[in-house]
Structure formats: structure tokens, C-alpha cells
Amino acid sequence: MDSDDEFNSVVSSDDLAGDADSSVGDFGADSDVDIEEDYQDDAAFETQEKDLRPKKKAYQVDFVVKSPEDIQREQDKHVADVATLLEQPHEATAILLRFTRWNKERLIEQYMDNQEEVLDKAGLGQDVRTSPPRIETVANFMCDICCEDAPGLESFAMKCGHRFCAGCYRQYLCQKIRAEGEAARIKCPGDGCNKIVDAKSLDLLLTSDLTDRYHELLMRTYVDDKDNLKWCPSPNCVYAIECGVKKRDLGKVVPTVDCACNHRFCFGCTLSDHQPCPCGLVKRWLKKCEDDSETANWISANTKECPKCNSTIEKNGGCNHMTCRKCRNEFCWICMGLWSEHGTSWYNCNRFEEKSGLDARDAQARSRQSLERYLHYYNRYANHEQSARLDKDIFHKTEKKMTLLQSSSGMSWIEVQFLEEASQALQHCRQILKWTYAFAYYLARNNQTEIFEDNQKDLEMAVENLSEMFEKPTDQLAGLKVEMMDKTTYCNRRRVILLDDTAQRLKSGGWEFNVELS
Amino acid sequence: MAGMSSKRLQKELTKIQGTLPPGISLVSAPDLREWQMDIAILDNPIYPPSDHYRLRFQFSQSYPIEAPEVVFMAINSNPERKIPLHPHIYSNGIICLDLLDSQGWSPVHNVESICISIQSMLAGNTKAEREFDSIRLLWLDLGGLADC
């Protein structure tokens, strides 16, 4: 009953929106599968209410937004389920589950196999149930941390017997929780002791402000431990997303999810929405844009290497007689041949036919060409990225325009909503266009690529048309309402077509890339 | 909080001023913030037993909950102290040892036990080199060319 495995199929199978096995515990809350159906999809006349659910597009994935309360409840439920099975108290079960990273099946199996070993490894002694943790006063005790030995000193120890005074223990836990952000795997302060401080002991020792922080951290580890849960990366967002897409599927699907805070991001890599480009290519592309790989490309396009020791050289003037500073090799910048073979023809290299010189020049031409190709895609990518940044301004301008329009044309609030819709469509489409260029950079040249480029061109044209209209002065906007709404709908339709086509081909492995998709 | 740190250090100091394991000696402990210790390695030909290495301990207010900061010091003369060659010791004296990191630290450790750990880390070493410095050498290798 591995619930994770059962869910694998959901992404790869077609249009299973919400049909996922209701028997699967984790996903029992299927009814609130929260695919935010875009209004524009409805406009595409495809959802003729055949089913209660709208048909899912190939580029959409199932996901659920979870609030902190949902997560806590889910966690408690898992613990309660397993606790009855293992006949262990709640705290111990929670530790055991965290120990196996919330893999119930593995825990139960291991536990049934060798109870003692599992308990031991998880940092639980055998008799967790017999005596609850308590703060005691022990005769002739000296705390190894603070060296305090006053009689009547309160001390605490877990089953491992490493006893420290309550004050030191508290301070140790405080340091771990507050400064190091640990929760689920805080170990006994004793050197080399692997026993984990359980929730009950913590509650006994901690002050209330720390208990809250501790429980919050515990909840975080639950989400961090589970592969099908991820925090929304947006700053200050408290929600987590549950999505069944596995890491190994990322070459076939771009799992884009919408958080309740309106942040749209990729579940696979938690970067901002990068449809239609799969995570592997996004990673490559960003690396290429950011790191030295383009510097390297520039170097090969603009510099040559010493034919003897391969040191890199940029020529910024001077004669063609080069002397390698490193190996003292003398050669000709033009033909890369040995300078000694040049005789006295210093500025007139007559050795163009030399084979080695020819090879060197070929290599340079190739890398120049590859640089040009990269720059073609990069410029368009960067342009859309910049436009997307300007979208923020546009959005604020839109709001102002909407109020202006309401007062100047006497239109009602609902009647000026078309501007906001247009603005949103522009933002979304530009984001996608941006990534189509990174995607196209890695596509091999074939018919499919041409179809893709046609789709890209159509979307880009639609976006530019709408964008132009969007920047018209406010007094003309009221008259353009119908046309603008049409263009918005068209943009969104082109967007859906492009995404759907790309996602379908990705799923069936129909794209041919010029790099390994890893 | 400061009370715990000073009380503990006070006790440690009293003990250290008494007996210490062979090769380890206290150099100075002017206050409860910074101490210096000397260590010698007794059974490794890489480090002659006559060579002593100077360790500087800096304690924060939350010692011993937090690990102290421990580095090797280089002193040019009177007496001369070098930074020992070891793949996990930088040329600036910083030591890479799990014990000194928050993950490996336990409040039960103390100055003496840290000295013993560092001593045995050096005693067990077989490579008289700094691994980290290979990165620097790599940069030096990237020499250039110029036209005449």
C-alpha cells in the first residue's frame, strides 16, 4: 500500500484530473484538487460540460495547496495511524516516522522485522512507555557542561543516562532550536550520543515561546521530508503545495503550480514558472547565462591559443609576431604557424595554406558561430525578461488607468476589468515567451522545431499587438475595449496552444534536443 | 548566561593549571575570552617533537553550548610557531574539524579534549601538504601570453 507509488501514474496518465484513487490516504482530499481554471480556458469552448470537471490540458498538473493547519492535521493523522499499529505512544511514533522520513510502509516493515534495532537507531530506548521524562534532583551530581555541583541542583537525563543540569539542557535546546533551526533530530548533548530528544522531553524543558518555534520547525521538517510536499518559495508565504510529480518525471512534464498567495512556480525546481521549458534545460540555460561558460565562449571567439602550450592570448594591437610569455614559443598570429618559418616576411603572412593554421581558424569560426547563435536566443530571452519586469509598472499604471477610466468615461468598476485582464495576459504570456527562447536554444533543427517556432511567432505577435494597444492614452482606451478584449482572448488562446502542444510532445518524448535532458 | 560560561571556564582553568596530557601546555589565559595553548606531536615524523604549534581559543558567551573558535597561530620569533602542514588546515591557521563545527560539537567537550583531538588529528596524518592550497596553485598556473 505504498501511496506514493500509486500516485506516480497520475501525472503520466492523460486527463485524470481528480480521478486519483480515493483509497489513497494522502490524497483523500481529492475533492478540493485546486486547479485554478483560467478564465481564458473556458473561453476556448472546449469544456461543454460533458463531465463535471473541466478537461485538463497537457501542461497542467494536479496539486493541492495546504495551509499550516492542514499540514499539522495530516501529520497528526499519520502519527495516530501508525501509533495504533506499532503500539507506541504518540511522541515515539512521531520520532520513528521522522526517522524514516515519513515512509510509513518502510517503518512498519522494519519495525516488524526488528523492533529493537529500529528503536535503537531512531534514538529511542526500548522502554519509552515505562517512565515518562522528568526533572530530578540527584545526589552528588555535577553537571559536565557548567561544572555546577550545588546540592539540590535540578537535572535531566534521557534514557541514555547523560545527565546535565536543567539550566544547561534548556540552553542547549534553545541554541539548537533558535540558532540552528533544528527540531526533529536534536541529539542528546552528550558526546557521540545519538539519542534524539523527543517532543515530550522538549515540552518539559522548554519555555512557551520556544515550544511554538519548535513545533513550527517540526512541521517544516515534515514538509521537507516528504517528496510530494514543497513550501511555496514566495517570501512570507505560509502555504505548502502537494503534488505527485516525481523527480524522475521532470524530463516529461513541467509541473507548474499556483499557490494560494498567487505565486506561480515550478514544483520540480521551485523556480518561478518556466513553462514550457523543462527543469533540466532551465538549469542549463541559467548556468550558461550566469557563469563563465559565455566568457569561455567569448574567449574562444576572440582569442587564440599558443600552438605549443595552449595558453590563451588576446591580441589587442602590435605585430603578428607572438611570443608566448609562458613557454617562449614564437608564432604568427595570422597563421598560427612557427615564426621561424616566416623568414623575413614579417607583416605579410604567406603561409595561409598550412594545414595546422587552417584547423585553428576553423575552430575559431565555429565558436564565433555558436556565440552568435547563443546571443540570438539570449537577447530575445532577456528582452522578455525585462518586459516582464516592466510588467510590474504596467500593472500599477493599469490600476491608475482603471480609476481614471471610471471617472472620465463613466464606466463602472466591472466594465474596466478588461484592462486588468489584458495586463495579466501580457505578464503571463511574456513569461512563457521568455522561456520559449531558452527552450528553442536547445532544440535540434527539424520540422517540430519549425512548428514550435511558428507557435512562438504567433504568440509573440499577439502579445506585441496587445502590448502596443495597452500603452495608448487613457482617453482612447474606452473606445478600444472590444478590440482589446478580443486581443486578450487571442493571446491567451495562443498561449494555451503553444503550452499544450509543447507539453504533449514533451510527455511523449517527441522533442529532439541538442543536449542531454537530465 | 555569562555566569555559566565563566564558571565552567574557571573550573577548566583550574584543572588545566594542574596536570595536562603529554605534549599539551597552557601558554596564557589572561581572561575568560581568549586562551592560548601549545601542542607538540610526539610520534609522527612529519612534525618533529621539538616543534610546538600555537592554538588560540576564543570563547563566546554561550560556551560551552557553542563551540569555541580554535585556530593555529603563526608567530615569527621568540618563540617561533608555524602552522602545521595538514590537508585540513589552511595556511591561515583555520582548522577543518567536525568537532569544532556546530554539528559535531557537544557541550561535554572542553579545551583539553579539543587539544587532544587536534593532536591526534596531526599524529595520524600521512600527507605533509595543504589540500586547500592546490586551488591557489591552479590559479597560478593560468599564466598569460602577450604579443611582443
Image (spheres, grey):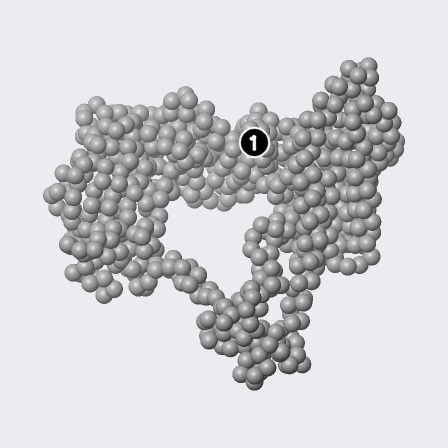
- In-front residue for pair B70/A1: B70
- In this picture, is A160 found above or below A69? below
- In-front residue for pair A139/A481: A481
Residue A9: tell me if it is visible: no
Q: Chain of mark 1?
A: A
- In-front residue for pair B141/A188: B141
- In this picture, is A345 found above or below B20? below
Q: Secondary structure at mark 1?
A: loop
Pinpoint residue A414: horizontal percent, then vertical percent: 79, 18
- In-front residue for pair B43/B133: B133
Displayed quadrant of residue A354: bottom right
- In this picture, is A107 found above or below B73? above
Pinpoint residue A34: horizontal percent, then vertical percent: 71, 30
Side of A472 relative to A164 (left or right): right
Quarter placement of the C terminus of chain A: bottom right
| Residue in the image at 79% along x and 38% along y | A463
Pinpoint residue A450: horizontal percent, then vertical percent: 81, 54
- The crowding category of the residue bearing disc 1, from other C-alpha atoms within 10 Å (few below 14, some 14 to 19, many at least 20), is few
Residue A396: tell me if it is visible: yes
Q: Residue at the left extreme? A: B18
| Residue in the image at 24% along x and 32% along y | B5
Q: Amino acid at mark 1?
A: Pro
Side of A430 relative to B108 (left or right): right
Side of B122 relative to A222 (left or right): left
Displayed quadrant of residue A148: top left
The residue that mark 1 highlights is: A235
Quarter placement of the N terminus of chain A: top right
| Residue in the image at 43% along x and 35% along y | A182
| Residue in the image at 26% along x and 35% along y | A145
Displayed quadrant of residue A370: bottom right
